[in-house]
Amino acid sequence: MDKNNALFYDKHSYLAEHAERFTKRIEKVTEGVYSAIGYGLANSILLITDVGNIIVDTTESIRAAQEIKGEFDKISPLSTVAVIYTHGHTDHVCGASVFMDEGTEVYANAKTKDLFNQQFNQLDPILTVRGARQFGVKIPREYLPAMGLGPFLHVDGYNPQLVMPTQEFEDLLELRIGGLRLKLVSAPGETDDQIFIWIPEKKVLLSADNYYPCFPNLYTIRGTTPRPVYKWVESLDKMRDLGAEYLVPSHAEPIYGSERIHELLTVYRDAIQYVHDSVVRGMNQGKTPDELVEGIYLPPHLQTYKELRELYGELSQSIRAIYDGYLGWFDGNATNLIPLSKAIRAQKIVDLAGGYQKMLKEIRTALDNKEYQWTAEISDMLLTITPDNDEVTSLKAEALFKLGCASQNSNNRAYYLTQSLELKGEIHYRPRSVDKQLSYAKSMSVDQFFSNMAIRLNPDKSKNDVITASVQITDNDAAYQIQVRRGVAEVRRGYIQYPDLWIETTGVVWKEVIIGAYDIREALHSGKVQLVGEVDLLRYFVNLFKSDSE
């Protein structure tokens, strides 16, 4: 991309102004409470007790965590007695290993392990790509002043080593660590596993990601299951009722004073409830998602708050997500029950427009007229028919670039610009390395790993196969049965009578074999895998759980 022709962000834009919040610093909130801001996408918070340090959230990067630890050690050189995850998102947990000392306990919501499994194993390939787009990790820094939540998602020095929770709770956990009393409270909102932390004697509230100073991300474009929007409102109400004097979010700066805190939490919950209730009312009136997006806006008194600018979350996307969360993808119009395929629809529209050349002319005209969204949409139609069309690809890339430059929503901006550079061949993605896959897999329970094996099955390779295997995991005395039936893998606990393959090994070795870090022949030769059955069949069976590219 020619930087001389690039429309870089306006240094006086809201997003550029917002970026100033993330100036790198350690901010003392009150005695014994410090927030590290601007080192990673999320803050890391230090709570000092007379028996050691408590670290709340650890950023996304080993390097960022190391820098923070160096600064925290200057304030309190005590060892870390506890790490607390406010939730399982990458930017809060991946630096944890830096803070671990002998005996350090790791506290989290009982749902956090499920989130780990989803984002680091089950959906890792797609979330890696879409997350990179959303956070702009591969675009030049001058294209993006900051993310709505923090400076940037730091992938330099990323290399995480997941540290799993050692202490879990469901609704409420009251702790006394040294002389410090804390309440860890389940608070579904941006995630199902979200918690907030209340320190009653200090009147300090750690709000996690249920409050940050921009419109809440009721849906994330990297992809997520429906967020519990109304529970988010209820969680904010719980926080409002505490009468906090200090609010320490996991993104951006602390807020001081009970009146200001109450005001901001109130307008935040009102904005979320207003959008939620407006969508539900409209749904019950039979309105479609498109109609709802056209008709719902924040009321004027809420629009005046900088803390509700759409710099991270985005209103129209939130509306669609709430609709989908309640009613799913179908908008109620029977025409859309079984629509034409994209290819057939695109061809018919091109024909209706007068053919390929007229459609191409319309794309060029739309781009010249600065109708960038229309340019992108009709480019998609031609690319559906002629996917290797370099000219149309280039026109679409230019349209996306212009859309990105015009956007002050950091997620949209980063996604547009990233995909533009992808189309120009300037950004590429590589699959997770075997070592990285194994690192994540080892952090998961054996149960979770076996359940994910069904997704790993290659349906084309196995379309004619019927194979049964019984796997005994010796280090936790668990047995699993795997039945491959023509493109489907049924995985269950327990034994299977007369399997084609009977396998005995440890959980770690099994993960290594399936991921491809340990050749099954070597594992058999070393005695780390015991087999009753045919060796060639076992090799074939293991290969069924690898993609064509592996």
Image (cartoon, rainbow, N blue to C red):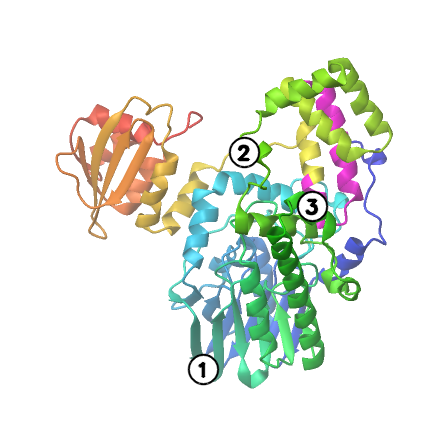
What secondary structure is found at the residue carrying circle 1? loop
Mark 3 residue type: Glu
Q: Label 1, label 2: how many angstroms apart (C-alpha)?
A: 61 Å
- What mark, if any, has residue 357 been given in the picture? none
Identity of the residue drawn at 44% across and 73% down: 172
Looking at the rendered structure, the kind of residue marked 2 is Leu
- Per the rendered image, the range of residues in magenta is 387-415
How far from the left and from the top, in percent, is residue 523? 25, 35
Crowd class of label 2 (few under 14; some 14 to 19; many from 20; radius 10 Å): few
Provide residue 185's location: percent of width, then percent of height. Answer: 48, 72
Classify mark 2: helix, strand or loop.
Answer: loop
Q: Confirm whether the magenta stretch covers residue 408.
A: yes
Residue that mark 3 sits on: 291
Q: Residues within 10 Å of mark 3 (few under 14, many from 20)?
A: few
Of label 2 and label 3, which has the lower sequence position?
3
Q: Is residue 388 visible?
A: no
The residue under label 2 is: 337
Mark 1 surroundings: few (<14), some (14-19) or many (≥20) residues within 10 A: few
Looking at the rendered image, the disc whose residue lies closer to the viewer, 1 or 3, is 3
Q: Are marks 2 and 3 in contact (CB under 8 Å)?
A: no
Circle on res. 178: 1
